[in-house]
Image: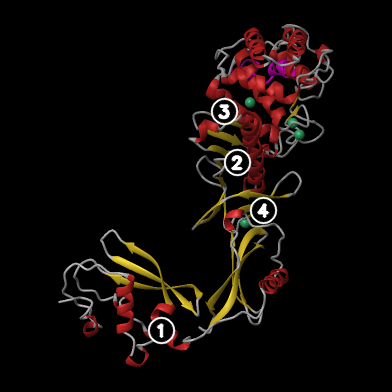
């Protein structure tokens, strides 16, 4: 028994017995014609259903797709499908894919001999659409990205009353919730009426308000059923809330909640996102450095602990952590506010990958120094660390240009940590008078005294970096931010430092890296002299 020939008699059940079947577009037409009522059988189905694709699925079923047309104009978004199943079987849901449906028959009857012609020009239709965008305050002049651009096309479009209208279909740039979007417009080619439209965000960005200036920022987010999360796939950057792995999320993609507790303030997350993105970009753009070669995300966590007055990098936990600060003069503001803080922590991560300097004594101080140095490279408009996180009249946490705040003489050689802390209290600087040369290194004992003074004696090298970069105080030409940063990166990338590097080792290796880096540079000698001078100034 032939499947195709017996079909008419089987409509309704489609129970078929047959050998293997292979179809064709022409056989599809035969099925269509056979299922037309006698009176319409002579209608040329070929004019209304134009072959487009043949698909064979994984079972060997053949699916023939026909584009619907009216008078040679394609019907937007509608196709007729004819299926030739591979195997003989009981099919109860294939009927409409083996025949002309009532709707198909009506479609053919209603449009027989019709030749749709536009009344409006394409420009007139486009203007009508733009007028509509303006009215809805969704108009933007930013052009669409190339991959979303489509040529305007005349199509037949089924309107809400199920009537087919000749329309211009175009895609225009607009905005939804202030986000750039692509709008599909269907403008009646006769009347200019907007028959339909649909807008879609093409570049979902979260929007949030920062802590520092109350400025609105847009940032990449990912969306899922639960809402939006701070994940930047291009930068491979995650921002977490409270604990590592728990994304910062928002249900309406407007990140502006302030809350009551400091840890509820979503703006700290916005600030961290922005600052980490700038840091990641700096390392990528300037040094072609990608965190763990892109194999793991940069994980930055806001709101760690309660009103925590610190930020840190943890190689164990694999990420960067930022507290909210106590918000009073005994502590700090949100640590996430500091671009230099973000860069400082990120640098600890970079150091850890290449030259893991033991976090104690001289190597620890060098670790802290390198982190401060890149803090000043990313937040390049000042030589202060933490200028955005201090509260009250303290301009910053550490002053790289002048660690002693002009009171270097207050630190005699051989000063011990306890006396140094005392001195700070006495002079009301909260202990923040720092040494600026090796001879004034503060003598610290291990863990209880800042891990042997890692955040204290680091200032000696901060001063070095300031002088070598700017040329100030060394009567020589400074190398400038970029060249200095390149040399620091060369030291790290070449793994030139021992994990327990001493101050003298740092000088030796840094000079070597500079020498390598400045090969062939017109100012090589000048710059090497500058660096040497700056080391001399800190007694090395
Ligand atoms: Ca929200
Ligand atoms: Ca700054
Ligand atoms: Ca700064
Ligand atoms: Zn640090």
The reply to whether the residue tagged 3 has its Cβ within 8 angstroms of ligand 4 is no
Q: Give the labeled residue for mark 1.
A: 103
Crowding at dot 4, Cα within 10 Å, few <14 / some 14-19 / many 20+, comes out as many
Q: Is residue 31 left or right of residue 230?
A: left
Magenta region: which residues? 447-463
First in residue order: circle 4 vs circle 3: 4
Q: Secondary structure at mark 2?
A: strand
Q: Is residue 449 magenta?
A: yes
Q: Secondary structure at mark 1?
A: helix
Q: Secondary structure at mark 3?
A: helix
Q: Give the labeled residue for mark 3.
A: 349
First in residue order: circle 4 vs circle 2: 4
Marks 4,3: beta carbons within 8 A:
no
Q: Quadrant of ligand 2?
A: top right
Q: Give the labeled residue for mark 4.
A: 256
Tell me if residue 42 comes above or below residue 253 in the rendering: below
Q: Is residue 308 left or right of residue 411?
A: left
């Amino acid at each position: 028994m032939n499947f195709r020939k017996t079909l008419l008699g089987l409509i309704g059940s489609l129970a078929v017995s047959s050998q293997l079947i292979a179809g064709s577009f022409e056989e599809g037409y035969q099925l269509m014609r056979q299922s037309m009522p006698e009176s319409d059988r002579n209608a040329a189905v070929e004019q209304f259903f134009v072959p487009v694709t043949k698909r064979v699925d994984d079972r060997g079923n053949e699916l023939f797709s026909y584009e619907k047309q009216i008078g040679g104009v394609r019907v937007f978004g509608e196709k007729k499908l004819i299926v030739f199943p591979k195997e003989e079987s009981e099919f109860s849901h294939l009927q409409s894919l083996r025949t002309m449906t009532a709707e198909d028959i009506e479609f053919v009857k209603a449009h027989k001999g019709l030749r749709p012609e536009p009344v409006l020009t394409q420009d007139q239709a486009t203007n009508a659409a733009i007028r509509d965008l303006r009215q809805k305050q969704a108009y933007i002049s930013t052009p669409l990205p190339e991959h979303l651009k489509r040529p305007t096309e005349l199509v037949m479009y089924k309107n809400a009353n199920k009537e087919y209208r000749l329309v211009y279909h175009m895609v225009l740039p607009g905005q939804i919730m202030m986000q750039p979007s692509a709008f599909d417009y269907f403008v009646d080619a006769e009347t200019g009426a907007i028959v339909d439209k649909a807008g879609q965000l093409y570049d979902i960005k979260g929007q949030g308000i920062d802590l520092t200036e109350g400025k609105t920022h847009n940032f990449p987010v990912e969306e899922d059923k639960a809402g939006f999360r701070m994940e930047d796939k291009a930068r491979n950057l995650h921002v977490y809330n409270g604990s590592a792995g728990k994304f910062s999320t928002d249900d309406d993609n407007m990140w502006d909640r302030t809350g009551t507790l400091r840890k509820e303030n979503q703006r700290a997350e916005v600030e961290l996102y922005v600052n980490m993105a700038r840091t990641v970009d700096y390392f990528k753009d300037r040094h072609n450095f990608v965190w763990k070669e892109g194999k793991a995300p940069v994980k930055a966590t806001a709101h760690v602990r309660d009103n925590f007055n610190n930020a840190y990098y943890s190689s164990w936990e694999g990420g960067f952590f930022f507290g909210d600060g106590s918000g009073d003069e005994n502590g700090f503001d949100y640590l996430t506010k500091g671009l230099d803080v973000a860069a400082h922590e990120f640098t600890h991560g970079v150091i850890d990958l290449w030259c893991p300097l033991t976090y104690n004594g001289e190597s620890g101080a060098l670790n802290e120094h390198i982190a401060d140095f890149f803090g000043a490279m990313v937040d390049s408009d000042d030589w202060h660390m933490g200028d955005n996180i201090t509260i009250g009249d303290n301009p910053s946490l550490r002053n790289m240009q002048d660690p002693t705040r002009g009171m270097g003489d207050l630190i005699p050689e051989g000063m011990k940590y306890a006396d140094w802390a005392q001195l700070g209290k006495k002079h009301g600087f909260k202990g923040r008078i720092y040494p600026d040369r090796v001879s004034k290194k503060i003598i610290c004992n291990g863990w209880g005294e800042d891990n042997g003074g890692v955040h204290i004696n680091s200032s000696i090298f901060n001063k070095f970096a300031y002088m070598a970069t700017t040329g100030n105080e060394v009567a020589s030409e400074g190398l400038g931010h970029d060249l200095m940063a390149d040399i620091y990166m060369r030291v790290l990338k070449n793994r030139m430092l021992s994990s327990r590097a001493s101050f003298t080792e740092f000088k030796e290796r840094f000079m070597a890296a500079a020498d390598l880096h400045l090969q062939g540079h017109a100012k090589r000698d000048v710059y090497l002299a500058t660096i040497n001078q700056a080391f001399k100034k800190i007694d090395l």
